[in-house]
Image (cartoon, grey):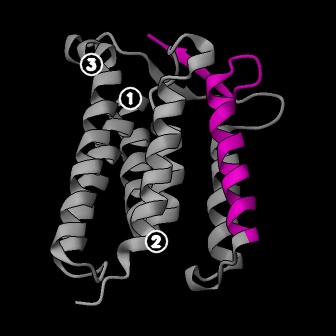
Amino acid sequence: PNSTLGTELLTFYTGFGVILGHNFPFYLKFKGGKGVAASVGMILFFDIKIFLICAVIFFGLFFWKHYVSLCSLSAYLAAFLLMIVFGQMGYYHAEPKYNIELYVVMAFLTFLAYYRHRANIVRLLKGTENKIILSKTKSGTLIVRLDFFVLGIFKTHSLSSFNTKECLIWIVLFLKLISSIDNPQISPLRIIQ
């Protein structure tokens, strides 16, 4: 088959580097994040269908169970499995060796995400993991901000009409939303133990 995965594979490796840099920054003595937010950006640029399916999984679990770590790990595993399914269905129009390379890199990233979340997994198993509950603040609630983000994408654009500039704007808005979750001073969330 005609391999069109070359550029996508290079993009994927670039994302891989970003995730490793996020998880192990040399300027912070290799103590960084867990890689989920960086992975969201990589998946969004690699395959928007996987991104949308994982977003549904993430937010569905979030509003049901309220454990962000469970949502992140479930969406990550789903991304890995969906990549295999789509690759085997010929969605990426690639030779088998490129698909296998893609699967191996994504398997490593999935393992890394689970490894970085090992303390969260222990707390989930013990039932001591923090729950995130939406609450009202002076600026409104997170659910209103999520509605703005999601409705903004789907009301103003069909998925095929996005251009690069618009994608970057929505990614910046999404990352701003995610960063507000981690900052208790500006976050519209409260943590329940």
Relative horizontal placement of residue 48, taking residue 163 as reference (left or right): left
The residue where tag 3 is placed is 124
Mark in the foreground, 2 or 3: 2
Q: Earlier in the sequence, mark 2 or mark 3?
A: 2
Residue indicated by mark 1: 69
Q: Nearer the viewer, mark 1 or mark 2?
A: 2
Q: Is residue 154 above or below residue 149?
A: below
Q: Which residue is mark 2?
A: 7
- The residue sitting at 48% across, 26% down in the picture is 23
Report the Cα–Cα distance between label 1 and label 2: 31 Å
Give the amino acid type for the residue marked by disc 2 in the picture: Thr
Q: Which residues are magenta?
A: 165-193
Residue at 22% from the left image edge and 67% from the top image edge:
99
From the image, which quarter does the N terminus lie in? bottom left
Which amino acid type corresponds to the residue marked 3 in the rendered image? Leu
Q: In this image, 70 relative to 134: left or right? A: left
Count of picture labels: 3
Q: Earlier in the sequence, mark 3 or mark 1?
A: 1
